[in-house]
């Protein structure tokens, strides 16, 4: 893709928009963005960032302000961990090429400051995107998505120079998201299509008469497609309501399990009821504890995960991972250094388990996953006792 092909001149009402398709690990992209801003001297520079990603690029101490306990209590551990995994993919790719991830975005910001242009954040909050994706996915799809995110931790070492050149045609972050969208088409609409709409709306409504917008090249076709289309920006920023089926099942499944246990005691005797209760406790406790152990949790955290799972699985308002995460946070006591080293630690698989912040998040996610699997393993075992 040549430099001229990367630049798209658009108009909207009385605005002139210079849209630049970039790659987040391309030196040429970074240089081109800087030169175009200096040449065009726009009123506004739009960048493909939300506030949280902007802060992560410009404020090196942002992660030190993260309220980890609040994230666990508000059940945002998976979203936060996913965000870090995506950041890891991007940072390691940039490190391999000797280029800081998002260099062209930083140059766009510096170029705007140098020329006196306003900086306009055009992307939807990554947490909203991930939360909407998570909310609308089925359980098995969530497992597949998380496994792909885990797999991305090993992928960078196998990338060839030819693949790097191909990435110049696509946003690096979206390269991973696009692969996920290809294998999980039900989430493509949120990960890619919705963001194309969002970017198109934010760029065309940015303040100023002349606007330079730097976005991942993979978004350019979508922005063209939605450029003149009406966009309901408020709905794109909203969290979709939880499905009725999920709301019913999160109460119905525990109620059914409790009913099964009570029925075992009442109709088949104390021995059968006790055996059913034992299988329930063992399946939940073992697999939840196994999940915590996989995250290299503290031994007491592993015990807490195992002890909590049989009870929390019957309470829709609690989760074993929530308990395990709080215990791990109390025992490991993350220090300032863990926050300071976070962005460097996530560039390696070992670092994810070494850093106390990411380890706590993985304890939450892995314990919840183990507890969920334990529930579905326990049910047939309980029924078999009755049979």
Image (cartoon, grey):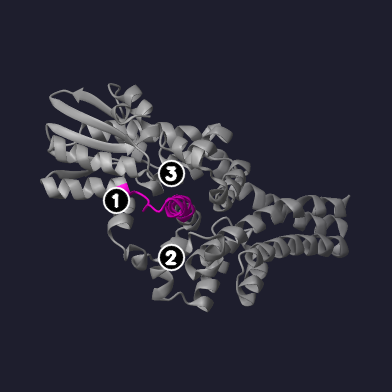
Q: In which quarter of the image is residue 210?
A: top left
In this figure, which residue is indicated by the disc labeled 1? 51
* N-terminal label among 2 and 3: 3
Q: Which of marks 1 and 2 is in front?
A: 2
Span shown in magenta: 84-103
Left or right of 337 on screen, residue 351: right
Of residue 85 and residue 387, the one placed in the foreground of this image is 85
* N-terminal label among 3 and 1: 1
Please state the horizontal and vertical placement of residue 229, each as a whole percent of the image: 30, 22
Q: State which quarter of the image contains the N terminus.
A: top left
- Which residue is at 50% across, 38% downward? 162
**Quick one: SS at disc 3?**
helix
In this figure, which residue is indicated by the disc labeled 3? 173
- Which residue is at 55% across, 53% downward? 153
Of residue 206 and residue 139, the one placed in the foreground of this image is 206
**Quick one: SS at disc 2?**
helix
Q: How far apart are marks 2 and 3 (CA)?
A: 19 Å
Whether residue 290 appears in magenta in the rendering, the answer is: no
**Quick one: SS at disc 1?**
helix
Residue 342 — which label?
Answer: 2
**Predominant SS along the magenta part:** helix
Of residue 33 and residue 227, the one placed in the foreground of this image is 33
Please state the horizontal and vertical placement of residue 339, each as a whole percent of the image: 40, 69
Whether residue 100 appears in magenta in the rendering, the answer is: yes
Q: How many labels does the image show?
A: 3
């Amino acid at each position: 893709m040549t430099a001229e092909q990367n630049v798209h001149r658009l108009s909207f009402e009385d605005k002139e928009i210079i849209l630049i398709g970039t790659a987040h690990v391309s030196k040429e992209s970074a240089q081109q963005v800087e030169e175009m801003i200096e040449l065009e001297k726009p009123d506004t520079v739009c960048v493909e960032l939300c506030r949280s990603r902007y802060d992560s690029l410009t404020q090196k101490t942002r992660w030190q302000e993260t309220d980890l306990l609040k994230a666990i209590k508000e059940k945002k551990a998976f979203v936060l961990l996913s965000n870090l995994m995506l950041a890891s993919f991007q940072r390691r790719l940039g490190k391999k090429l000797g280029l800081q991830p998002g260099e062209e975005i930083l140059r766009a910001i510096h170029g705007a400051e140098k020329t006196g242009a306003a900086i306009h954040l055009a992307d939807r909050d990554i947490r909203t995107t991930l939360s909407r994706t998570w909310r609308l996915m089925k359980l098995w799809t969530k497992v597949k998505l998380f496994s792909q995110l885990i797999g991305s931790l090993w992928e960078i070492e196998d990338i060839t120079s030819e693949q790097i050149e191909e990435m110049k045609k696509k946003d690096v972050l979206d390269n991973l998201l696009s692969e996920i969208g290809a294998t999980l088409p039900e989430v493509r609409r949120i990960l890619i299509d919705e963001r194309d709409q969002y970017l198109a709306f934010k760029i065309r409504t940015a303040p100023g008469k002349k606007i330079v917008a730097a976005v991942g090249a993979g978004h350019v076709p979508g922005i063209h497609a939605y450029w003149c289309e009406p966009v309901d920006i408020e709905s794109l920023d909203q969290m979709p309501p939880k499905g009725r089926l999920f709301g019913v099942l999160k109460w119905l499944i525990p109620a059914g399990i409790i009913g099964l246990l009570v029925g075992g005691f009442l109709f088949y005797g104390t021995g059968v009821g006790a055996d059913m209760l034992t299988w329930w406790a063992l399946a939940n406790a073992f697999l939840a504890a196994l999940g915590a152990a996989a995250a290299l949790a503290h031994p007491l955290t592993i015990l807490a995960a195992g002890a909590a799972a049989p009870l929390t699985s019957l309470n829709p308002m609690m989760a074993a991972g929530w308990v395990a995460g709080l215990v791990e946070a109390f025992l490991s006591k993350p220090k300032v250094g863990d926050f300071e080293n976070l962005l460097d630690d996530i560039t390696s698989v070992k670092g994810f388990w070494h850093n106390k912040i990411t380890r706590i998040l993985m304890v939450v996610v892995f314990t919840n996953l183990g507890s969920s699997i334990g529930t579905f393993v326990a049910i047939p075992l309980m029924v078999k006792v009755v049979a």
